[in-house]
Image: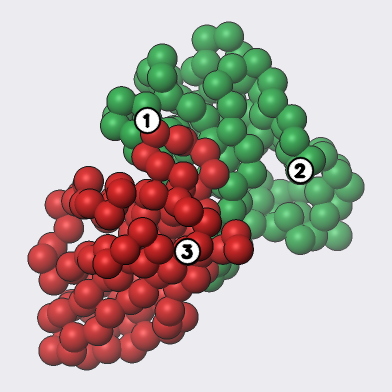
Amino acid sequence: DTEVTQTPKHLVMGMTNKKSLKCEQHMGHRAMYWYKQKAKKPPELMFVYSYEKLSINESVPSRFSPECPNSSLLNLHLHALQPEDSALYLCASSQDREVGYGYTFGSGTRLTVV
Amino acid sequence: LAKTTQPISMDSYEGQEVNITCSHNNIATNDYITWYQQFPSQGPRFIIQGYKTKVTNEVASLFIPADRKSSTLSLPRVSLSDTAVYYCLLFIGSARQLTFGSGTQLTVLP
């Protein structure tokens, strides 16, 4: 299995809702990442997990809460989002943080906040 | 952290070779140059990575001069399906972090 699987593919949520994005990989990668991508912009790094521990939090608002239950799974919990948080949320994995190549990205979750 | 600069857009015709150049004037000794391809509503896909000189794989070549202040992605004989955004990225060795550039929209015309 050489894929990163993200669910759901599309999500519409209200500003008072709580939802979660899920990401799964079975490549034995020990680093996993969340990126946010606005239309016609490059992906921006949000969080990095290395060996299931949070390594980087790029000053992301607390309404985004990451979780790494095990080495194959990565969640992003969403609460009280704003319309400007609407974006494509991408999950990625790599062998580990020391390796700068071979990042595998999922297809993303298209999030719309209404 | 070092950043990359690349053209916003490029047009080409089917069957032509396309060269996309990226500048990274502040690249550090332990930074690597990486290129990704992204189609609409999909995640970026790894194309090629290099440190210096030339690297070639089954889909592209990457040329990096000795001063490493720029790099050129070469796509041989492009087809319509190569229409996508191409990102020049640096893997910042000191931060162990992949940093995306602004991207180049390549449009291949028939």
The quarter of the displayed image where residue A102 is located: top right
For badge 3, the amino acid type reads Gln
Q: Nearer the viewer, mark 1 or mark 3?
A: 3
Mark closer to the chain start, 1 or 2: 2
Image colour for chain A is: red
Left or right of A61 in this view: A40: right
Residue B92, numbered circle: 1
What amino acid type is highlighted by mark number 1?
Ile
- Foreground: B12 or A25? A25
Q: Between B11 and B102, which is closer to the camera in this rendering?
A: B102
In the rendering, which numbered label is found on residue B59? Answer: 2
SS of the residue under disc 1: strand
Q: Looking at the image, which is closer to me, A105 or A113?
A: A105
Q: CA distance from mark 1 to mark 3?
A: 24 Å
Label 3: state its secondary structure.
strand
Q: Is any atom of residue B109 visible in this view? A: no
Q: Amino acid at mark 2?
A: Val
| For residue B55, above or below residue A77 | above
CA gap, disc 3 and disc 2: 25 Å
**Hue of chain B?**
green
Instruction: Check the image and report above or below for A11 versus A60.
Output: below
Compared with A89, A110 (above or below) is: below
Q: Quadrant of residue A111?
A: bottom left
**Residue indicated by mark 3:** A25
Q: Chain of mark 1?
A: B
